[in-house]
Image (cartoon, helix red, strand yellow):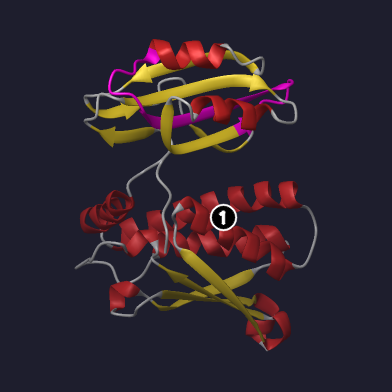
Amino acid sequence: MSRRPYPGFYFSNDARMFHVVVKMKDVPGALSDVLSTLHETVDLVSSFSYNLGDGTAMLSCFGRSLSPDGNPAQVKAALEQSPMVVECQVKKGGNGVIVDTYHDGVEIAPGRPAIVIDVAGFSRVCDHISKLMGTGGETILFEEGSALGQMSGRFLKDKIGQGRLDQRVEAALDMYKAAGWGSGSLDVERNGAQYRITVRNCLECSEPSAVRKECVFLKGHLLRLVGSLSGEEFGIEETKCRLRGADCCEFLLARREAEAT
């Protein structure tokens, strides 16, 4: 398992650490030109870029000045010499953390903002709800997971279009992994009547629990996600869970007509 650093902030007490944001022309060679200019003054530790759809693109990165006396004004001046740069911003660190204050959040897709939450914190929230409300708390978690799963399924169906259900579910599981929900895999059984989904490092059971025995939020999410992607009714059972001592979580989904036979 390999996790990438969150692009919104970088922890460092080094006063030579900078955050750089560059708006540049969206033309071939622009990114390489900007990176080449940056490499003359900054040792990059992380970066990401994206297209704005208006003929420009953005680069956001954290890096350490190559010079002991380096400062934001020098980096900014060097960037402004590039004909590819439309505008830029350079911010200095040194207070333990340097934060990307140019952006005000993240998107999982254009026009679909998201939040970042600590995985252990989410697991503890689920535990606290169950402690406070007992089985009623687990019902709430299941229903909220179901509502979110249905919304996510409809969104994905609109974005990725038609195709085999197993391929669309696998794409959703890959997105789970990229978002930090856990690493999922799919086995199709009984000629497509049954789907076995295995999730390793599930976010819901990342912390031990004395009150919960299954991942009801993810259970509801998977049920409605698959149902929305397929347009069919499924039943679901969590056959393995780390909260019950297993090394992973496993969910068995079966089409309703298959359950009846």
Q: Secondary structure under badge 1?
A: helix
Segment colored magenta: 50-72
Which residue corresponds to the image point at 54% horizontal and 21% vertical from the top-left? 22
Which residue corresponds to the image point at 25% horizontal and 54% vertical from the top-left? 124
Q: Nearer the viewer, residue 130 or 76?
A: 76
Residue found at the very far right of the displayed protein: 162
Q: Point out residue 209 in the picture as x, y percentages from the top left corner.
A: 22, 66
Q: Point out residue 150 in the picture as x, y percentages from the top left corner.
A: 60, 53
- Which corner quadrant of the image does residue 100 belong to? top left
Q: Point out residue 244 in the picture as x, y percentages from the top left corner.
A: 29, 78
- For the N terminus, the quadrant is bottom left
Which residue corresponds to the image point at 46% horizontal and 31% vertical from the top-left? 61
Residue 92 lies, with reference to residue 97, above or below; the image says above
**In this picture, residue 184 sits left or right of residue 14:** right
Which residue corresponds to the image point at 73% horizontal and 85% vertical from the top-left? 191
Residue 8 lies, with reference to residue 258, above or below; the image says above
Under mark 1, the amino acid is Met
Dot 1 crowding, Cα within 10 Å, few <14, some 14–19, many 20+: some
Q: Is residue 238 visible?
A: yes
Was residue 137 drawn as part of the magenta stretch in this picture? no
The residue indicated by pointer 1 is 175
Q: Nearer the viewer, residue 126 or 64?
A: 64
Residue 25 lies, with reference to residue 62, above or below; the image says above
Q: Nearer the viewer, residue 173 or 137?
A: 173
Q: Point out residue 178 in the picture as x, y percentages from the top left corner.
A: 51, 54
Q: Is residue 51 visible?
A: no
- For the C terminus, the quadrant is bottom right
